[in-house]
Image: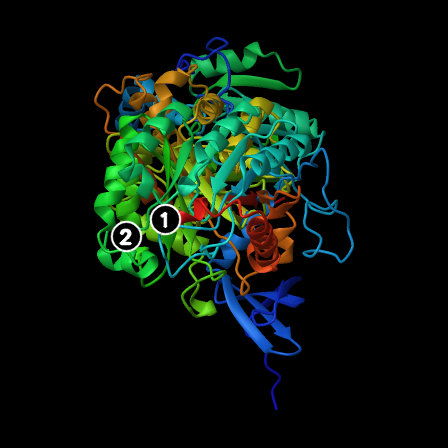
Amino acid sequence: MQKVDRPDVFFELTRSMCPECRKIIDAQIRLRDNQVIMRKRCPDHGWFEALIYSDAQLYTSSLKYNKPGTIPLEFSTEIVDGCPHDCGLCPEHQQHTCLGIIEVNSACNFACPVCFSEAGPGFNLSLEDVERILDRFVATEGNPEVVQFSGGEPSIHPDIIPMLRMAFDKGIKYVMLNTNGRRIAQDDAFLAELAEVRPVIYFQFDGFEERTTWTIRREKDLLAEKMRALDRLAGIGLDVVLVPTLERGINLHEIGAIVKLGVRHPAVKGINIQPMFHAGRHIAADPLQRLTVPDVLKAIEEQCDGMFLVSDFVPVPCCFPTCNSVTYAWVDGDTVLPMTRFVEVDDYLDYITNRSVPDLSGEIKKALEGLWSATAVPGTDGVSTKFSLACSACNLPSLDVADMKDHIFMLMITDFMDPYTFNVKNLMKCCKEFLLPDGRQIPFCAYNNVGYREQVREQLAARGSRRGATAAATDL
Amino acid sequence: MQIHPPPSPLPSKGGGDEELPGARPSQRRGEELRPSKGATDEVKACCAALYQNDYVRLLLGDSFHPGGEALTRELGQAIGLTAAGHVLDVASGRGTSAFVLAGAFGCRVTGLDYGRQNVAEANARAHPLCEFREGDAEQLPFEDATFDAVISECAFCTFPSKADAAREMFRVLKPGGRLGLTDMTIAAQKLPPGLDNLLSVVACIGDARPAAEYRRILGEAGFERFVERDESKHLLRLIDDIRRKIDLARFASAIKKLDLGGIDLQAARETALLAKQAIENGAAGYVMLTAVKPA
């Protein structure tokens, strides 16, 4: 009898969780047919396999973009039970908080069948809660750059405007509002307040077809409302990042049209595409058919008439490099020129390959690191300045940042983990944290998968009902 | 034909003499195009016209020679250069490779180039181990059996009479001396369609041949013990550099920092992509070829 070879490459061993019982278990990363598969076994629930990256070559080659993490000024927890049970951040976490997210409520004015935060009645943070959170954020980060207000649906929180204002007052440079846009489309007074406070709008936008919005949002005539909100935001000169949730068989075929809308709409300065992940409320899906970063990149290349190519994207080094890929382009009308085609970003963001490129400028490297990070907020002066600086790598004459501002466009793919794809290795370097009233900062994918969300929600809801303070707010 | 170093096409912060930071440090502008006297008038005219265009200088000026200095050093190793040797560099341009070899191996290097100005500039560097002479690769102005080694980089493919050039290199080598070439190859006699234009000419594929044919020509001149090494990755890198510069020029033009004067960048970009495909599917390539003159 002949011995036979295994059908795939055993690439590494890591830790994940059982999708049934959430117990933390060992997991193998295997390379099979140029795909990256996670394979794991729960003693109680058996074997599981999930696709985590559909291009093994891209996966392994992206590992060089792994930038050494930064240590926050203070940690908030101690190591007791080991990752991912000590969040956070505990002293073993490998990155500081680039992007802090505050979920100000759990209620929403939509009723989507897909919602990782399982929006519904529950809690409202008070302005005092938010102040405590922001003060803690300043204490751990020194000069935190970006905070994002989320929910639930944060725009329906009665104190959302003072909360946004407070974040600016605490010295945070970029304040984002993560919203479905309904209140922006409908509420003139709210729009006027936004025009004064001027957050960047992180704007849920899944596509144009009724089937898409019905499947993901249980909404039929959503497009007119979305376009109205976008046009109103353009009218007050606010910058918008479109945030499509993307899934095979639902709206993957719409990504080209979404990108083109983003490139052309005056309010839109970037797009952050998030493959659908199966945490919280979600639609059942085959874990081996999961949409991953390379699938999205390929769909973009196929559907955008050459505007963006797979090769235009570079992994984001601040978190684990397989979690995000991003590119920046100079855009004018239908002219789209991705920066990565003329600046050798690779040379600057390679932290592992021992290459002797003696004339790399530290200033340019820093600018590129700023763009290739979770703190980059498209439409802002910060991004334009860094873009211009990076162009000096090509010996271009100094560029007028003010002229550039409206021409710079960001296109990012962020792949969040679910219990099928959960990888403790990625988690340990996560730089997007939920900021909690008790002072903890919990990495995005730990919060959604490990049980923190449920625990915190219960605590906050119990507190709310004791105080009776949130009764008025939940009427919205 | 003389190739002048092209001026900096874009205004630079510190004056016109800076290297483009994006370029390989090994590649200096205008250095690597080393035509010999034998280059046809057609090629000459074409190169001259191209080089009169600032914009083409921007695209190609500093990234002509696949592999750069690193590949020159590897070539030196492959033919076993030592401090005791005396090397002839045929089509030595402004002397970069000669200086590299003299620096790396401590050998004496004589450079030969058809371009008077190239020779003058190379001699002006006054390197103690290097001297440069004007002359024709097909009629080398040296006695028989003068050199321990002969090299020629990205130039053999441009010689109209390759047989004459091969015989001459053989003649000036001492018995047992080594020959080292790096050069463009094409899989068949003819270039893939779409590549017989601007980019192919300036990238010296005008009269490139399959590696086997180089071996045949050199073999007929008397060379033996051929070793062939595929170096096509350097060519891919060069095409990437060119493509990157095309995109940079599009950007510079879009932000109104560069006047393209009606040049079709999109076409240039497509040619670069065609060239890349040709290299990837083996239709074109770059090779290092070493051989020995029998003792």
Separation of marks 1 and 2 at Cα, in angstroms: 10 Å
Identify the residue at the far bottom of this view: A1
**Looking at the image, which is closer to me, A224 or A464?**
A464
**Looking at the image, which is closer to me, A319 or A28?**
A319
**Amino acid beneath label 1:** Pro
Residue at image mark 1: A244
x and y percentages locating residue A434 in the rendered image: 57, 45
Q: Is residue B81 left or right of residue A215?
A: right
Mark 2, residues whose alpha carbon is within 10 Å: few (<14), some, or many (≥20)?
A: some
Disc number lying in front (1 or 2):
1
Q: Are marks 1 and 2 in contact (CB under 8 Å)?
A: yes
Q: Give SS at disc 1.
A: loop
Question: Which image quarter holds the C terminus of chain B?
Answer: top right
x and y percentages locating residue A221 in the rendered image: 22, 52
**Amino acid beneath label 2:** Glu
Residue at image mark 2: A254
